[in-house]
Image: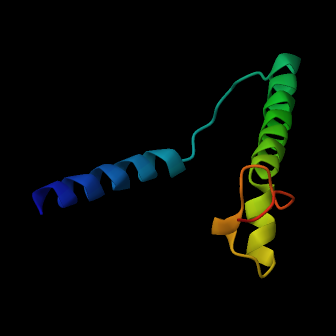
Amino acid sequence: MHRLIKFRLVVAIVGAVALAPSSAHAYIDPGTGSMVLQAIIAGVVGGLVVIKMYWQRIKAVFSRRDPSKLSEKGPSAPEE
């Protein structure tokens, strides 16, 4: 119980510090914009790769097929 109280206290302090307004007199150079764009593109491409890897299972969720019967080769493989 004591750990839970400490954990809640730490979360409250971190949350208060994160939400506290502070002025940041900082300069964002053009390289930062390209880095953000690269991160967005990487996230989209990564998401597409994950969807491609699990496409058969995703299709099975929306159809009436049993995903446990899917083989590595997909639905075109002969069933046993």
In the picture, residue 22 is in which quadrant?
top right
Vertical position of residue 45 compared to residue 34: above or below: below
Total numbered labels placed on residues in the image: 0
Q: Is residue 17 above or below residue 39?
A: below
Q: Residue at x 80, y 23 (%)?
A: 32
Horizontal placement of 30 versus 6: left or right?
A: right
Q: Which of 14 and 39 is in front in this view?
A: 39
- Would you place residue 20 above or below residue 69 in this image? above
As drawn, 73 above or below 69: above
The way the protein has been coloured in the rendering is rainbow
23 or 60, nearer to the observer = 60
Foreground of the two, 46 or 68: 68
Q: Which quarter of the rendering shows the N terminus?
A: bottom left
With 30 as the anchor, is 67 left or right in this view? left
Q: Which residue is drawn at 70% across and 65% down?
A: 80
Q: In this view, does 76 lie to the left or right of 7?
A: right
How far from the left and from the top, in percent, is residue 31? 84, 17
Residue at left offset 81%, top offset 78%: 63
Q: Where is residue 73 in the image (x, y as percent from the top left)?
A: 79, 50
Q: Where is residue 45 in the image (x, y as percent from the top left)?
A: 84, 39
Q: Residue furthest front?
A: 80
Residue 65's quadrant in the figure? bottom right
Q: Which residue lies furthest to the bottom in this view?
A: 64
Q: For this rendering, which residue is in front, 14 or 37? A: 37
Rendered location of residue 64, percent (x, y): 77, 82
